[in-house]
Amino acid sequence: MVGSFLAKDLTQKGHSVVVIEKDPQICERLARTTEAMVINGDACDYRYQEEARVDRADVFAAVTGDDDDNLVACQLAKTSFNVPRAVARVNNPKNERIFNLMGIDAISSTTVIGHLIEEETTVGDIITLHLMRKGQFAIVELDIPENAKNSCSKPIKDLGLPKNSVLVALIRDEEVLIPRGDHTLKCGDKVIAVTSVDQEIELKEKLTK
């Protein structure tokens, strides 16, 4: 899923993109919905990177849900095809240091959360920003509206949030707060939360009604 979003976003911005994907159905869908060149194969295999002409790439990105595969694919691109920059999705934050030591730019969920908090990206309704655990959980951003009677002026511990949802940051004016149970939400706050995908709607209702 991350690879599909990247391919669509980068091609729309005018970049030349080649995708190597194992799943034939995903390849077929990408070929229909993006302008990227799509190759059905394993990016850990030399022949598929050669077919993709990785030697011409400015950046190689490995974004599967398997850290081992991402590491092997990036190392192959760097050592066999001399790619100037390799970027990898790291699913286990403990592996981030290993990737960095090997000259691979590692992006973990922890890093993404930090950037989101610092940059305050995406304004408006609840929006999925990054999927984790193969789509079971999502980082979402939500604005607390002025008429949110259920959440405004109430401590977080009293909001009755869904079981698999947790607030990880509050952005209030120019200040970033790490929320605790006794913190009170205010209308106009921006909330960043981690929630199971099937509870996004329930989380929205708890915070905005």
Image (tube, rainbow, N blue to C red):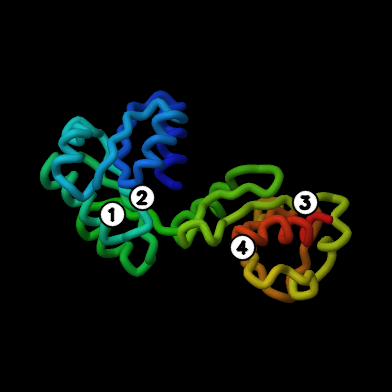
The circle on residue 85 is none
Residue at which label 4 appears: 195
> Of residues 180 and 2, which is closer to you in this image?
2
Q: Amino acid at mark 1?
A: Asn
Among numbered discs 1 and 4, the one appearing first in the sequence:
1
Residue at the image point whose x is 73% and y is 68% from the top? 161
Residue 188's label in the rendered image is 3
Q: Report which residue position mark 2 lands on.
A: 63
Q: Which residue, given by chain and number where applicable, does mark 1 sit on?
A: 70
Measuring from the top left, give residue 84's x and y in whole percent.
21, 39
Is residue 114 found left or right of 28 in the rendered image? right
Crowding around mark 3 (Cα neighbors within 10 Å: few <14, some 14 to 19, many 20+) is some
Could you tell me which secondary element the residue under label 3 belongs to? loop
Q: Residue at x 78, y 61 (%)?
A: 206
| Disc nearer the start of the sequence (1/3) | 1
Tag 1 near tag 3, CB within 8 Å = no
Which of 166 and 114 lies nearest the eye of the viewer? 166
Q: Are the two marked residues, 1 and 4, in contact with CB atoms closer than 8 angstroms?
A: no
Comparing 140 with 164, the one in front is 164
Which residue is farthest front? 25
Query: What percent of the width, then of the height, locates residue 144?
Result: 77, 53
